[in-house]
Amino acid sequence: MRERHVRMVLPRAAAILGSVALVGVLVNFYRDAAREAAAREERIGELLDDASDLLNTSIGESGIPTYERRVVIGHAALGRAQSETLRQAKRKVDRALQIDPDNVAAQGFDSLVNQVGSKSPRAAVAKPGTLPRRFASVYYSLGNAFLAQERPDEAIESYRHAIEISPPHPEAHVGIGNALLLQGKLEEAAAVYRLALNSAPKLPEAHHALAVALHREGKFDEAFAQYTEAIQLKPDFAIAYEGLGELLFGIGRMDDAIAQYRKAIDLAPTMASAYNGLGAALAARGELKAAVASYRQALDLEPDWSVAKANLEAVLQGTHSRH
């Protein structure tokens, strides 16, 4: 009886040990699979972060429009350097898709990258709710790229996606305001700039943008206050000094306008519009020789700029008028 009991116990023990071993194999299998999946996700994240950095540094910064004589000016197409950087970003996204073709983030990023430089009337973008927070900066850069190409509707759509992913995103609100300003919607632009300032009262770009909108509306006192605030928050803000110079010129304070233009030039020696404004202020004060030199400097920087050419010709002919 005892031997029979032992014989029965031994198979059970073997079965138990076998089951334990099988469980161990399965646990290790799933653990290895989880590690591989985590490694894939990490690598995809690294590739997408690299692509995001490329977009932000190349297109996001260089594509930000500048203010020239109170008008937002963009660039019709991406430059050669930006196009090459875009290709580099696309290659990184393609590598992420090779790792996992079904990765939602990689698919969404691919859709975004394909829109930069595209001439399609509408951007086909991934649903923001499915995307990680890193996509806020990508949508923001995409908005800058659209705005630089003077495509305000698409820019606004991209900026709104950035806000939805990572609220309140005051920089994206400034971008929306810039797009509205490009469309001539001054009051709407000012309202959006104020929204940006509600969440980021110390953002100098928002104060400057609001100053531009108010300036164009003819609200000079309010614009003056906003230009001044922008400069106080960012003492090397060259474009804000130029804008303040424009405002002071418009109300006849030539000495003060000249001082602001010169400050802008000191900070940004390649700012052609500041040389043009300085030339106009010098000419208005009767310093025609200095005005000619300033206009010529503007044209050295922007040889095809018709406004500076007309101003120079007017001074040389003795019939100078304000740009």
Image: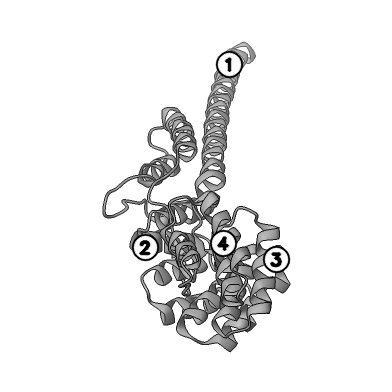
Identify which amino acid the numbered label 4 is placed on. Val
Residue identifier under label 4 = 292
Placement of 219 over or under 60, stated as above or below: below
Q: Nearer the viewer, residue 33 or 262?
A: 262
Q: Nearer the viewer, residue 16 or 78?
A: 78
Question: Could you tell me which residue is drawn at 57 percent across and 76 percent down?
Answer: 284
Instruction: Work out whether residue 199 can be spotted.
Output: no
Identify which amino acid the numbered label 1 is placed on. Ala
- Find residue 29 and report its horizontal and vertical position in percent: 53, 24
Question: Could you tell me which residue is drawn at 60 percent across and 53 percent down?
Answer: 270
The residues bearing labels 1 and 3 have C-alpha atoms spaced at a distance of 88 Å
**For discs 3 and 2, the disc positioned in front in the rendered view:** 3
Placement of 270 over or under 222, stated as above or below: above
Residue identifier under label 3 = 263
Task: Name the residue furthest left.
Answer: 121
Identify which amino acid the numbered label 2 is placed on. Pro
Marking on residue 229: none
Residue identifier under label 1 = 14
Quarter of the image for residue 266 reads: bottom right
Judged from the image, the secondary structure of the residue bearing numbered disc 2 is: helix
79 sits left or right of 282 in the view: left
Residue identifier under label 2 = 152
Task: Name the residue furthest front.
Answer: 317
The residues bearing labels 1 and 4 have C-alpha atoms spaced at a distance of 101 Å
Identify which amino acid the numbered label 3 is placed on. Lys
